[in-house]
Image: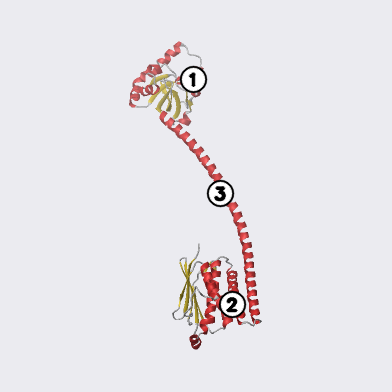
Amino acid sequence: MLNQFKFVNPLKMKKPSSEKLATETNPKFKENEAVFNAIAKQTTEGLIVANMRGKFLFVNKAFCQMSGYTEEELLQLHVFELMDEDQHGFFIEREKYFGTPIKVSLNHKNGSKYFVEILGDNLIVDGELHVLGMMREITDKVKWEEKLKNLNKVLEHEVEDRTAKLDKTINELNAEIERREIIEKQLQESLEIKQLLLNEITHRVKNNLQVVSSILRIKKEGVISPEAKAVCSETSDRIYSMALIHETLYKTSDFSKVPFKAYIDSLIKHLMVIYGEGRTQFINECDKTILPIDIATSCGMIASELITNSLKYACTGENSSEKNDCWVRVSMKKKGKNVTFEVADNGDGLPSDFSLENSKSLGMNIVTSLVHQIDGKLKIEQENGLKICIEFALRK
């Protein structure tokens, strides 16, 4: 058997003689027609036999239906008359394609195009070489493959477009991240500089206030009038209480929050030096409430006024001096945004005719004004001593 079969396009050859054509239409293959007819009837696929010139020698009914031609019409045609022009040079190398379906485009009788898969082989009948071809129509399959191919192209284009947009977005985000990192670095550097400046300012304000307080206390020694001495002393204490706020800020290095318990400890130590250590028991029951600087300053001055008042009056009363057990308690409790601030002592309390509205005491007027500044409520209780309670809410 030959190693390959090949259709030779008769359209490109000299027309054979009438005698030769007569032999083509009636080959010895006709002797085996019954066998091929039996085979053709058993298959639903197109079945053809053609000579090496491409002339149809046998076609089954399935191929006739596939091509739109009758059997008689096909037997007068060549294979190349059904194929597209670009496929006139069609041939199959048996060694390479044996048993492999080949996709071929054919022209229907009505002029439309359809696709088939041809499974072909060489066939020798009485020593004469022929081509046997089995065809399966795959037009729908080809159309779906083309649609799928086009869809894949669309999807690939869409993916490329989306990928390009995503890459652009990523690049923009990376650029934005770099820009923000630069800005954050600049802000951090600026914040550190401001922190140093505020630290220095706070330190200087504290020193200046302490200097003023010390000057007033020294000046008091040269004043003869008792009233003037008292004014100098009280003013010095008030200025020093403000200096303590700045000292507390300087120690914490946080210029928006003041730990009030630490401030009260510093204030008590200062007042113990002035009024004598050991005379009075101080009780600090403040929790870990953190106050903003404006409220802390007001509460600090209130605490200074009230504690000083207790030391000056409550711990010098007859009952307290006899028992020598005077105590002053400072308390601050925070619940949610609400704060309760109390200063209490076990002294003799306020005079029976005392009226907060009509008080001429500078200290109490200062306290009342400061409570008003923090939008607080002041309440006085006189049972087993004096307790002044101030309630206020932390602002947002």
Front of the two marks 3 and 1: 3
Q: Residue at x 57, y 52 (%)?
A: 177
Disc 2 on helix, strand or loop? helix
Query: In the image, which disc is placed on residue 234?
Result: 2
Left or right of 180 on screen, residue 101? left
Q: Residues within 10 Å of mark 1 (few under 14, many from 20)?
A: some
Q: Position of residue 381 (x, y in %)?
A: 45, 76
For marks 3 and 2, give the CA distance. Answer: 62 Å
Q: Viewer-nearest of labels 3 and 2?
A: 2
Q: Which residue is mark 3?
A: 173
For discs 2 and 1, the disc positioned in front in the rendered view: 2
Query: How far separated are the C-alphas under marks 3 and 1?
Result: 65 Å
Q: What residue is rendered at 45% in x and 34% in y?
A: 148
Direction top: furthest residue:
18
Residue neighbourhood size for the residue with mark 2, other residues' Cα within 10 Å, grouped as few (<14), some (14–19), many (≥20): many
Residue closest to the eye, 55 or 273:
273
- In the rendered image, residue 319, in percent from the top left (x then y), is placed at 48, 86
Mark 2 residue type: Glu
Q: Residue flagged by tag 3: what amino acid is it?
A: Leu
Q: Residues within 10 Å of mark 3 (few under 14, many from 20)?
A: few
Q: At label 1, which amino acid type do we have? A: Asn
Nearest the eye: 203 or 139: 203
- N-term-proximal mark, 3 vs 2: 3
Position above or below: 175 against 262: above
